Amino acid sequence: MQPANRRRAWVVGGLMVATAVGCFVINRKEELITKFSIVSYWGATHVARSNTSSGSSPSTVDTPGNMKRVVDTGRTNTTSSNRTNSGGNLASSSLAISQVTQDKYRVIDTSRLNRTKGWALFSRLSAAGELDFRGAARYPVTDEWMTPLEREILQDEQLQSLDSVAAPGRSSLVLVSPSQNGNVTVGDKVTVRVDLKDARGKRVRKGGHFVRVWMVQHHGGHDRALAAEVTDMRNGSYVASLPVLWNGSIEVRAAMVRSREFRRVMLNLKRTMKMTNQNVAAFVSNKTEQVTLCSFVPIIPGFPEVCNLTDANSGLPWYCGKPNKTKLDCGHWAWSSHTSFPRRYPASKEDNMLLQRCASSSKALQLGLLRRHLNLTSVKGKEPTEIANKSCVPGLARDSWTDQSPRGFWDNQEWHSLVGCPLPRLNGTRVKKCFQDTHVIFLGDSNARAVFQVLTKVLAGCKPRPDPRKSYHPNMLHVPFHYDCPHSNTSVSWYPHAYPFFSGSGQWSDVRVKQAPSVVLDKLPSTGKYVILIHLFIHFSPLHISIYAHHVRNTARAVRDLLARNPKVKVFVRGPHAVLGGRFQLSSDMFTEQCIRVLKHEFRHLRDHVIFLNTWDMTIANENVGIHPKMSVVTTLSRLMLAHVCPTLK
């Protein structure tokens, strides 16, 4: 834009702001704007039409015709993107967006890039007042995945004091039945109730908190644990029933991992900011580089022009701020990393204090353990290990999608199933025979890669396939892996999923090697023996649930098409696990609950053919905190796959 035109745009923007003063009021205490009619930002005026009634999304953001200016990217002209996506208008906008075209296998020097550049950019924009999420707040995302309870929670009053938030240390765990002085018999059902109280000792009278209940035993050389399904009574009380499976002393534990107030804050932030952690892109050309912010919606705070990277992201919505350095354009997108949100979120002081409390590094505080546990003593009876270890054939794929809980229990880091068959050992000979002449493909994040690593280790003798990209890639963990196992004619591969993808701390990830699972699945032929595991979860947790649903829907479509042309393919979908630690800890059980809801809906027509690997019970029972579950969970998943692929193999 010429200087004169730029000045005129600022003048027009200023006049529009003056006209709009009477249209809305900014609540400085909340520091969060979710409703407005006309907002001027980026030196130009965007007119937004809204429909803020419950259950509806605002219409798309419109821009005046003179805003659709052509930007010379050195490759393509700016275009108006009108892609129609089933994920709820995720990639539709009439903003000025530059379309990317990527060079393949361009060797790029990353020695000048570091994670602090993303943090510095975020901090600078925040300090300059340019980190304005009002435009992103106006961008429509679907609320189809929101439950009636979540809609109710969004209507709660603003938090005034942390003392009114449910406090695990003040809450109580009560034995409901049986009531015979804590003595029970193997085979009994124990029912307990959690009564929540706030920091002042006052009873909480609303539901919507995330409460966990599980049973443990440390007795006679055994470390055992099982999780219970918890029922929200919607009055501040939560009820759970657990079967008594073991002899001796047992303990029932409970935790309130996230409060109703936390849930309100996160639902609001994800509707307005769209993501609570920030992806950053590095655009690089020779000795010139620039870092910008990214999102799945085409409105990036601090950047008047946006690169549409959707085509480069397997056709799934992805946008980054367009670099303003003269030697760079959208086609120079090369690397991706992440940064945390600096200082405070665009929320009230009390809400930010609540989020800081949830980010504690203490495991006890992260879990929200209630101070008092219930100690019980069970008398001698027949323990279920003798029942579960019988010979049987695994249940139908549809059975794996049921909500039965508990599905099993831990005994000294070994999982014992209560709903199917004993799990086969990962014996090298058995595994080689099972996967003879088979292509095994893992699609997703590092938790899918972990199962890949267990399998290649058990197969033994597998050789990595040469990949020229690895010779200059700074992050070896986020490049696809391919192993060939000549002794069994088996190939094993892992592919990282498309963006959003958050690299590890201080790491930059090569954008050329990320692709949607659908890209891999659509290329598979109609013949051949294939075993596929898909896992989409942790990298989506800082984002609005609609983008997760968009990726899952895209994947389910590809699975359906693959099974239609090759019915012998065995497909596994790994579900989300309990997580509290790491950079994704804020979303916690709220996002996990949403993910399971999405997976069950999108794969509802494929449940007779796709096996759901449910890790929720496993990871609650072993009190998992980190984003990567313990190796016992990974090994169990490998054994579950083996049981379903080769159920009769001895």
Image (spheres, rainbow, N blue to C red):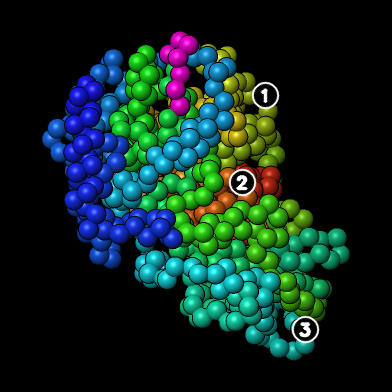
Element at badge 3? strand
> In front here: 232 or 421?
232
- In the image, residue 551 sits, relative to residue 240, either above or below, namely above
- Which quarter of the rendered picture does the C terminus lie within? top right
Distance from Cα at disc 3 to Cα at disc 2: 40 Å
Q: Which of 11 and 42 is in front in this view?
A: 11
Most extreme residue toward the bottom is: 180
Badge 1 local density, few (<14 within 10 Å), some, or many (20+)?
A: some
Name the side, left or right, on which 72 lies relative to 489: left
Say whether marks 3 and 2 touch (CB < 8 Å): no
Predominant SS of the magenta segment: strand
Of residues 166 and 568, the one nearer the viewer is 166
- The crowd level at tag 2 (other Cα within 10 Å; few <14, some 14-19, many 20+) is few
Asked if 496 appears above or below 638 in the picture, the reply is above
Give me the C-alpha separation between circle 3 and circle 1.
53 Å
Region in magenta: 285-291
- The numbered mark, 2 or 1, whose residue comes first in the sequence reads 1
Mark 3: which amino acid? Asn
Single out the mark in the foreground, 3 or 1. Answer: 3
Q: Taking 77 as reference, is 207 above or below it? A: below
Q: Mark 1 points at which residue?
A: 461
Residue at horizontal 41 percent and vertical 52 percent from the top: 270
**What residue does disc 2 label?**
582
Give the mark toward the camera: 2 or 1: 2
- Amino acid type, callout 2: Gly
Secondary structure, mark 2, is: loop
- Residue 534 is at least partly visible in this image: no
